[in-house]
Amino acid sequence: MRLSRGAPLLAAAVVAAAVTWPIPAAGTAVRDGHCARQEQVRVPGSAFQRSACLPDLTTAGLAGTPYTDLADQAGLTAAGTRTPSGVPGLQIDGYFPDSSHFNATHGWRHDAQFVIRLPHRWNGGLVVTGAPGTRRQYATDKAISDQVLAQGYAYAATDKGNSGSDFYRDGTRPGDAVAEWNARTTQLTRAAKRTIAQRYGHAPRRTYVTGISNGGYLTRWQLENHPELYDGGVDWEGALWTTDGPSLLTSLPTAVARMLGSARDEDLYAVGFAHGSEFLWPYHENAYWGVTQKIYRAEFDPTYDPACPGPSAGNTPEQILAPCPGDAAYDYASRPASVRRAVARVALTGHIGRPLITLHGDLDALLPKTSDSDVYARMIDASGRDALHRYYTIRGGTHVDGLYDTFPDRLRPILPCYRSAFDTLVTWVERGTKPPADRTVGRPAGGDVVDSCALADRDAPMP
């Protein structure tokens, strides 16, 4: 991990470049002249970039090309999700100077990769996001990029500076890898604004930050620490890091203990897992709980069990997803003060400086809302910033919308509510229209649950 301050640190080793990728013949973007002088659009601070003039910047047009990665989007959206298409424009891919090499996208094996999309018909705005989980820069193309591009926004996404299950190996101090996520998001936001000014003749009039899971955490952190860069944000089930807890390091050890047979269902309820979410637990045992606990514990508390996960979380899916047995007994509260200092470097305070809308599913079985967004909402209230916040619990929502396809009778996708929340944020910021009060948004008994959600539909008062 290395971020440049001033001149790029790797300038001598990696020469910045702007080369045009192959483009489909006779594309709309080429015919209307949108990409004239594209080689003159440079991303400030980048160590390498290359651009492509494309007839469609959405996943419908990019599927099967080097300009997106459908595999990295797996599970984030329901199969029946409808997305817009036909947005011509310029795509710039590249990376900032960095010393780590987890991201092999494009064969670059270089971290701090980004994508910036500049639509032909620009509405004057910019949307910035960071990858959820340990995914990379194309992860939210279908969930976020498609919709905002169709609305005319420029779009920028970062891989956060490290990715994959071994991300905790980045940096030299505990907490370095996650701290880099925040720095890379700030870096991309500043660079994207200057890139936009080159392309369109002026900087964006409005900039919004948003994201899913770890991207939601980034949204929270940016609005607390760099409100001057943004006009508002939408936080979709953001991860919560607090110095003294709660965090996933205070809830997931119990989930790991249940995996290993040393905890009961009642123990999971006690740390925040929802009654009624039990049908989702087998999936999370196989896909999330073990690996998530061990790699984040290794990031902040590597001395707890140096042998597990060790220099790698694993070489096979089975090894990667397996928990460290010792994590079943992990007790964050009893760990040395150095662990809390590591978490404190990235901790949230609730002191947001711009409007924020938070969404959280009541059946989230990875980041239970009672130990996450419920707590964060109280932190915002305690900071005296409650007028800048709206919080909507989505009845039947869980951490990834793809599970709706397996349990359509018990779940609903959050993406339609996210789209509604984004539009609500924009009218709040730009027209002064106050959003609905905090509430639980009910799961409709019928209708188009995959593509429709009205935040004003009250299900029940917030607890």
Image (cartoon, rainbow, N blue to C red):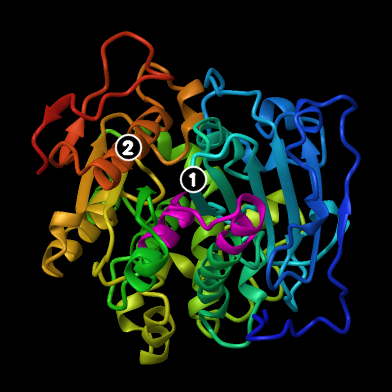
Query: Tag 1, which secondary structure?
Result: loop
Report the residue at 47% width, 38% height from top: 400
Look at mark 2 in the image and give the residue it sits on: 421
Range drawn in magenta: 193-220
Q: Residue at x 41, y 54 (%)?
A: 216
329 is higher (above) or lower (below) than 66: below
Image quadrant assignment for residue 433? top left
Residue reaching furthest bottom? 337
Relative to 386, is 300 on the left or the right? Answer: right
Above or below residue 410? Residue 305 is: below
Q: Amino acid at mark 2?
A: Ala
Q: Give the class, few, some or many, for how many residues have Cα within 10 Å of label 2's Cα (few <14, many ≥20).
A: many
Tell me the quadrant of the picture where the N terminus can be found.
bottom right
- Relative placement, left or right, of 462 versus 255 is left
Residue 47 x/y as whole percent: 78, 71
Quadrant into which the C terminus falls: top left
* Residue depicted at 75% across the width and 29% down the height: 32
Viewer-side residue, 51 vs 263: 51
Type of the residue with mark 1? Gly
Q: Looking at the image, which is closer to me, 314 or 54? A: 54
CA neighbours of label 1 inside 10 A, class few (<14), some (14 to 19), many (20+): some
Q: Which residue is mark 1?
A: 124
